[in-house]
Amino acid sequence: MEVLSYLLTPFTDPIMLFALAVGVFAGVYVGAIPGLTGTMAVSLLVSLTFGWTTHISLAAMIGVYIGAVYGGSRSAILLNIPGAPAAVATGFDGYPMAQKGQAAKAIGVATTQSVVGGLFGTLALAIFAPLVSKIALNFSPMDYFMLAVMGLLMVGTLGGGSTVRGLIAACIGVLLGRVGQDSLSGITRFTFGSTALMAGVPAVVAMIGMYGFSEALVQMKSRRFETVKQDVSRIVPEVSTVIKHLGLTLRCSVIGTLVGAMPGAGGTIAALLAYDHAKRTTKNPEVPFGEGAIEGVVAPESSNNAAVGGAFIPMLTLGVPGDSVTAIIMSALIVHGMNPGPLLMQNSKDLFYIVVVLCLIGNIFLLFFGLTGIKLFAKFVEIPKGRLFPIIVILAVTGAYVTNNQIIHVFWMMLFGVVAYLLKRFGYPSSPLVLGIVLGNLLETNLRNALITFRGVGGCIQSIFTRPISLILFLIIVYALISKTVWFLKLKSSFVSIFKK
Amino acid sequence: MNEKKEPIPADGAEKTTEHSPSEEKKAEKLLQPGGRVFSLMFLAFGLVFFIQSVQLFQKNASISGYATFPLIVSALLLILTVIDYIQNLKIKSEIAELSITQKIWRALCFIFPRDTLIFLLMSISYFLLLLFGVPFIVASLIFLMATMNYLIPHQFLKNTVYAVVLMAAIYAIFVLVFKVTLP
């Protein structure tokens, strides 16, 4: 009865529902604008919410969070510029779909599967919070390191091209991410005496350049342009389409929730893992992955939205934020006199259930806002390329500048754009480079912590074989590595032929 | 069922013949002009980071120190680039029979086709305008007008409308709604 009253609290406060709805709406469009991320929007919002009540400010922040995670997919599908890192994988197949005139189908499916994923994540938050948080609590630095290695290995082999080239790009990204001050010791590395490099390579700016500016350069190679007329006559996907992919959606939602619950992992890894899962498990996609496979949109979108619910689990139960947005929400809650952590579940049980219901309603709002206003947004891709690409450059310049109000960031954006253009021109994937920059710190910090915790390399290796979680992660890495080798594929085909005989 | 609509040609533009992915895969069998030099650039990049990492490691030889991880990654990068270079050697180059100057010229033409080069130079000029203090709105309008009129000529009025509307929208979203400072 007590729980029920907590669950009904948002319904008794119209202002809270209004704040949530406005938050979701704003989040969708902020997330869709290249350069404006959910993290940035929530951080801007925090300063406004100090004067509001805890519940209303929480509603607005959760709304923006849910909306922005989904919103990133729109620009990924329509412009090939992920609004957020979590939407990187969505662009792999979403953008090829838009190029074929199927933007509305991609956005429609992305919306419904995002909502299903979001609802799944919320349900998991409500039911499995204590259990999952216990598992996440048992993760050692070595496990986090292996998780990040998994992410990089996976993205290195995502493009379907040369694994070596994918890994080269990933290594370059990791090394570029090491430029600047070391997060543990404060020592500056690889700055070559330049003060401009002290703060390191800005990941968001690199991402804008590599996905926005470079795309404009790549498409500019021909003077003859053609536009793709987007079919937006049917935005709402057919029920059969949703049901057909429900199994994949639910599997990816599980991945998203679990990864989201791991502090620091977040929606990006969740989406990439889900994409890889879809690629490996979908046997006969109607369209090959990377060329507009609908499964390539379903998987990351359901996963990154499920990760939202997952990210709240360690934040509310352990006081450890699951990602950057929950870190901001946590700091806002502290300003409001709350203390996220194990005691919150005992002292402010109402807050936990209110978060659950807000996530639930937020996803329903998302369904409405996600399936409306697409026609206007889709017009972007109907603009002739001769006009679209200068516009993308302007948005990329604006996005790069507003991240830190420094003109040098515009230079970085253009430099990374040219680098990505050259990579694409010579057949090297650029996504592993971006992911390398993003995951580099997670990799290094946890490797060094693991080396300290387990007293050297021997201890780290030993820990893999003495801890079930570590062993599972290690086996996944080994499988991911050997499954791409020629001898493994030969062995697999010979086994298949033996079984057929 | 929605009928798939055919792509429509852009205003003032001719229809292009895009390569299908399978055609591109076929084309990839020949190494692109400058492909080997490009892979050597990765080797140089890895080498710079490796040498720097070794120097850092000499300052702090701890296994859990700040030099270990970059050392491992840069060493891995060197190994991978060598493998990649060897793999590239096995692929026949498009420009194998040409003289060195012709090779350089073909590689440059491959890397920067005319429109790409002009667009890149316009973008760099736009950045320089911003760097030298030209207001964002003015610099962006100049860039938009220049690029749009180059890429879609003979549509000055339409291009102007696009440029002005876009700049108004950017100003409204970033400055009025989000109170963001523009360059």
Image (cartoon, coloured by chain):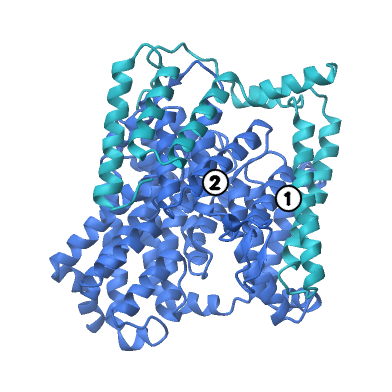
Chain colours: A blue, B cyan
Residue A24 seen in render: yes
Q: Secondary structure at mark 2?
A: helix
Q: Amino acid at mark 2?
A: Trp
Counting residues from the N terminus, which is met first, the one under dot 1 or under dot 2? 2
- Horizontal side of residue A121 vs B48, given as left or right: left
Residue A124 seen in render: no
Q: Quadrant of residue B3?
A: top left
Few, some or many residues within 10 Å of mark 2 (<14, 14–19, 20+): some
Residue at x-position 76% and y-position 82%: A455
Which mark is drawn over residue A20? none
Disc 1 to disc 2, how far (Cα)?
36 Å
Q: Is residue A177 above or below residue A347?
A: above
Q: Which residue is mark 2?
A: A412
- Horizontal side of residue A129 vs A370, given as left or right: right
Q: Indicate the quadrant containing the C terminus of chain A: top left, top right, bottom left or bottom right.
A: top right
Q: Amino acid at mark 1?
A: Ser
C-beta proximity under 8 Å, tags 1 and 2? no
For mark 2, name the chain.
A
Of A355 and A424, nearer the camera is A424
- Horizontal side of residue A334 vs A10, given as left or right: right
Q: Quadrant of residue A62?
A: bottom left
Q: Is residue B148 above or below residue A354?
A: above
> Seen from this angle, which residue lies furthest front?
B132
Residue at x-position 41% and y-position 64%: A325
Q: Which residue is mark 1?
A: A483
Report the label total. Answer: 2
For mark 1, name the chain.
A
Residue B21 x %, y %: 61, 27
